[in-house]
Image (cartoon, grey):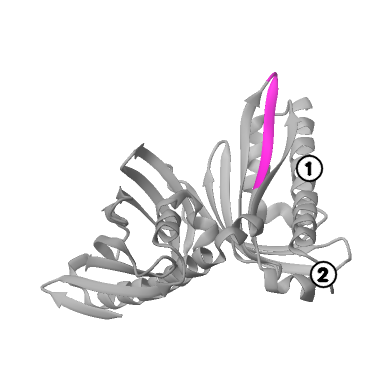
Amino acid sequence: MRAVTTTDTYLTTHGITVLAPARAVYDIIAEVADWPQRFAPNVHVEHLERTPDGERIRIWATAGEVVKSWTSRRELDPDGLRVTFRQEVSAPPVAAMGGEWIITAHGENISRLELRHDFRAVDDDPSGVRWITAAVDRNSDSELAAVKALAELGDRLGELEFSFEDTVFTTGDPALVYDYLYRADLWPERLPHVSRLDLKEDPADATEPRVQVMTMDTRTADGSVHTTESVRVCFGPDRIVYKQTTVPALMTAHTGSWTITPAGDGVAVTSRHTVILKPEAVERVLGPDKTVADARAFVQRALSTNSTTTLRHARAFAEAATRE
């Protein structure tokens, strides 16, 4: 990384060589909705506006030990293999931030990817500059490495990445369903598969979605306990999205959501999961001769079992309270 300071604006450039076609690299960067499961720092991306050559998005991402959120505009140039971005609303200590992804083809299957940033700190505070520089360095290196790994997977990415849903229908009060899913701090006493859950939440702000950071111990069918860490963004009254920041051994990424939607004379409550598997862990975790297909089935069965249990308990809670 090289950095240059001009007055109070700081410029950084990070780069990496990718053994994949330039177009494949560009497509990974352009599909920002997929970033939460593909890039470690990103928790959730919400599209606010979309046009053929641009978009306005809100991003929640980890920066060090904290979760930050900001709104950005992105301009997409598929012919020039560039994506530019500029934050509209930055989170302190960032006063302003922008930059560009630039992909250069060096042959049919070799590309050079650069990620450039320009930023200013609030009041040009030196401690803020240091914090932003460290966050930009850490996240840029992580994102570049992720793009490289994903692009070099080629067609295998479609085998390793998959999504699925579980849904229950209820005539219970949807506000009570949401509250059950939102109050994850009560899950150890409410759900049989949750043995421990530590939850921290940002101070309440009626104008903003609430952000929760939680550590959970989950019991599996064989009696073992797995510890996961997650960040949840709670869009009351009908949606919670999350990303596991510490995942079980078979996965490299796991994101998901809980949604409540009208259906007939009640509501449909849906748990959605998106997973990227870790192929080198399959035989170590599941045993000799096990395949990625076996891992897909195993992971889906385990996650569906837990999410369906949660959905059924939420339904029972809401329907019991509605009858009272």
> Residue 210 vs residue 269: left or right?
left
Q: Is residue 145 visible?
A: yes
User: Which of the two residues, 183 or 263, is positioned nearer the viewer here?
Assistant: 263
Q: Residues within 10 Å of mark 2 (few under 14, many from 20)?
A: some
The secondary structure type at the circle numbered 1 is helix
Quadrant of res 194: bottom right
> Residue 249 vs residue 132: left or right?
right
Image quarter in which the C terminus is found: top right
The secondary structure type at the circle numbered 2 is helix
Q: Which residue is mark 1?
A: 313
Q: Which residue is mark 2?
A: 286
Q: Residues within 10 Å of mark 1 (few under 14, many from 20)?
A: some
Q: Residue furthest left?
A: 7
Q: Position of residue 318 (x, y in %)?
A: 73, 34
User: Which of the two residues, 39 or 191, is positioned nearer the viewer here?
Assistant: 39
Q: Position of residue 142 (x, y in %)?
A: 45, 72
Q: Position of residue 197 (x, y in %)?
A: 69, 62
Quadrant of res 265: top right
Q: Residue at x 75, y 35 (%)?
A: 168
Q: Residue at x 23, y 66 (%)?
A: 119
Q: Residue furthest right?
A: 222
